[in-house]
Image (cartoon, rainbow, N blue to C red):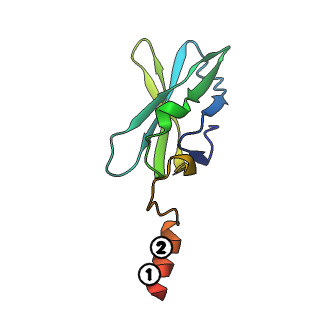
Amino acid sequence: MNIPERLKAGDTWEWTDSLPDYPAPTWVLKYALHKTGIAAIVLTAVVSGTDHKVTVSSATNAGYGAGEYQWAAYVEHADGRRYTVGEGRVILKSSLLTAVAGTDNRSHAQKTLDAIEA
């Protein structure tokens, strides 16, 4: 799967997956992203020949919270079949362009270290 390891909220996300066993348009590829405390975010790929192209606009993902998300990629067929084709983790970073006063952009590790040292 070609989902990047890191994504930034407020940027356009794009990648293409080739799945020879599950070609588009016969199969539809979807990604479910989940972080504790929120409902799953579902991204649906569009047809690009026999490949699956995922595009998420900056306006769509600008409000997604920063943090580590688990993802699962799965394909669906019109006849009801569904198969998981990949799983992993992605780090979603917040955009500095939308930061408000008081935003703390330190990593969890840095916050913990600073607390210990204090």
Please provide percent x and percent y for residue 103.
46, 60
Element carrying mark 2? helix
Estimate the x, y position of residue 114 in percent, counting from the top left.
49, 80
Residue pictured at 63% horizontal, 43% vertical: 4
Q: Quadrant of the N terminus?
A: top right
Residue type beneath disc 2: Lys
Compare residues 23 and 66 and report the one nearer the observer: 66
Could you tell me residue 95's position as x and y percent? 55, 48
**Observer-nearest of 77 and 4:** 4
* Residue at the spot 46% in from the left edge and 49% down from the top edge: 69
Vertical placement of residue 34 versus 25, above or below: below
Query: Which quadrant does the C terminus fall into?
Result: bottom left
Neighbours of disc 2 within 10 Å: few (<14), some (14-19), many (20+): few
Confirm or deny contact between disc 1 and disc 2 (CB under 8 A).
Answer: yes
Tell me: 38 left or right of 66. Answer: left
Q: How dense is the environment of label 1, judged by Cα within 10 Å: few (below 14), some, or many (20 and up)?
A: few
Farthest front residue in view? 101
Q: Residue furthest bottom?
A: 117
Amino acid identity at mark 1: Ala
Q: Is residue 23 visible?
A: yes
Please give the label number shown on residue 44.
Answer: none
Q: Which residue is mark 1?
A: 115
- Secondary structure category for the residue under label 1: helix
Which residue does the numbered mark 2 point to in the structure image?
111
The residue shown at (40%, 49%) is 35
